[in-house]
Image: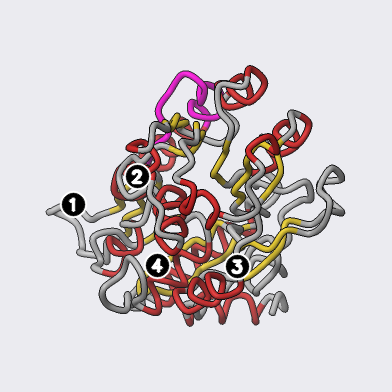
């Protein structure tokens, strides 16, 4: 290791430790480039981009597909499927591949107060109900906001229409925001349209909310886009009267483009394997290398693995 390599590795280690210790008082957008200097042999660049206006939402697969970034996380997996198919938000198929799909079990839920006596999102449209909705920040192409808005559109609804009827909506930057639970408990909202249900749904159910089914024709339309039909199971949420038909919102796929060098793709998977005991994941169980390289309930994978990643997983007998 020469002096420049040593300083680069030191910098990465220090940066990782600083963020681990101070993450609650720092930002969380990462942009990292590993490139050659003008006086060095020219090696292929490797650029990572996580979170932020362009890398934290619907645009991330576009940035990767156009090679402006080499590696990115996307949440949830259906957005990656949509981009790969060129459906919905994406006007053309994006040449993206998977390096891994990390677990993060989740569903989209449309919860409303029982006092409203609403049986379907159709009822809201027909009655022009002025709901007080808690939902996610619109942000810059936020994946949750896009999904909620798209589903509402299939029922002839929009947040703007509901506001014109006398309703309102309260945006939260994340589902577990303390403001969300306060609004539910105080009766300041009578509907919650969001994902991240483990952080708020039990609270809503205890406060007299119920969850609406999505109709079969809407689910079929969503499936053609790249979403996956699923249920919010009563086995997880005991206060539900039954399983609720909805769409899956699981998975944190780590993606790249089809042109990434096979050795680089393999090296990324090797790094995940080497650090699997310290990598934080949104799951109660330790990171399982055999699960992140295949389609699972908590980490759906509906696009091809990069060839370099596939070779690594097979050589290690994970696939």
57 vs 237, left or right, is left
Contact between labelled residues 1 and 2, with CB atoms less than 8 Å apart: no
- Mark 3–mark 4 Cα distance, whole angstroms, equals 34 Å
In magenta stretch: residue 57:
no
State the residue at coordinates (51%, 26%).
23
State the residue at coordinates (70%, 38%).
114
Q: Is residue 214 above or below residue 30?
A: below
Q: Which mark is residue 89?
A: none
Residue lying at the far left of the rendered structure: 38
Secondary element type, mark 1: loop
- Mark 1–mark 3 Cα distance, whole angstroms, equals 56 Å
Residue located beneath label 1 in the image: 37
- Mark 4 burial class by Cα count in 10 Å: few <14, some 14-19, many 20+: many
Q: Which mark is residue 256?
A: 4
Of callouts 2 and 1, which one flags the residue occurring earlier in the amino acid sequence? 1
Of callouts 4 and 1, which one flags the residue occurring earlier in the amino acid sequence? 1
Q: Nearer the viewer, mark 2 or mark 4?
A: 2
Contact between labelled residues 4 and 2, with CB atoms less than 8 Å apart: no
Q: Which residues are magenta?
A: 17-31
Q: Which mark is residue 161?
A: 2
């Amino acid at each position: 290791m020469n002096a420049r390599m040593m300083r680069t590795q030191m910098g990465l280690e220090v940066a990782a430790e600083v963020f681990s210790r101070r993450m609650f008082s720092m930002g969380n957008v990462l942009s990292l480039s590993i490139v050659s200097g003008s006086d060095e042999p020219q090696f292929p660049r490797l650029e990572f981009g996580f979170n932020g206006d362009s890398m934290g939402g619907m645009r991330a697969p576009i940035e990767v597909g156009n090679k402006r970034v080499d590696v990115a996380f996307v949440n949830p997996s259906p957005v990656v499927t949509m981009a790969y198919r060129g459906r919905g938000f994406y006007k053309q198929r994006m040449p993206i591949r998977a390096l891994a799909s990390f677990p993060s079990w989740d569903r989209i839920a449309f919860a409303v107060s029982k006092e409203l006596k609403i049986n379907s999102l159709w009822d809201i449209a027909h009655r022009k109900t002025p709901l007080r909705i808690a939902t996610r920040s619109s942000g810059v192409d936020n994946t949750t906001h896009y999904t909620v808005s798209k589903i509402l559109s299939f029922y002839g609804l929009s947040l703007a229409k509901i506001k014109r009827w006398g309703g309102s909506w309260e945006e939260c930057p994340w589902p577990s925001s303390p403001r969300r639970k306060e609004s539910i408990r105080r009766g300041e909202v009578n509907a919650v349209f969001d994902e991240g249900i483990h952080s708020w749904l039990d609270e809503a159910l205890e406060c007299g909310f119920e969850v609406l089914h999505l109709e079969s024709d809407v689910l079929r339309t969503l499936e053609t886009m790249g979403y996956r039909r699923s249920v919010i199971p009563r086995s997880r949420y005991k206060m539900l009267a039954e399983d609720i038909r909805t769409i899956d919102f699981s998975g944190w796929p780590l993606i790249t483009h089809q042109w990434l060098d096979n050795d680089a793709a393999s090296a990324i998977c090797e790094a995940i394997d080497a650090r699997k005991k310290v990598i934080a994941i949104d799951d109660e169980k330790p990171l399982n290398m055999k699960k992140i390289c295949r389609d699972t309930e908590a980490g759906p994978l509906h696009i091809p693995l990069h060839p370099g990643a596939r070779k690594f997983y097979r050589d290690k007998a994970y696939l």
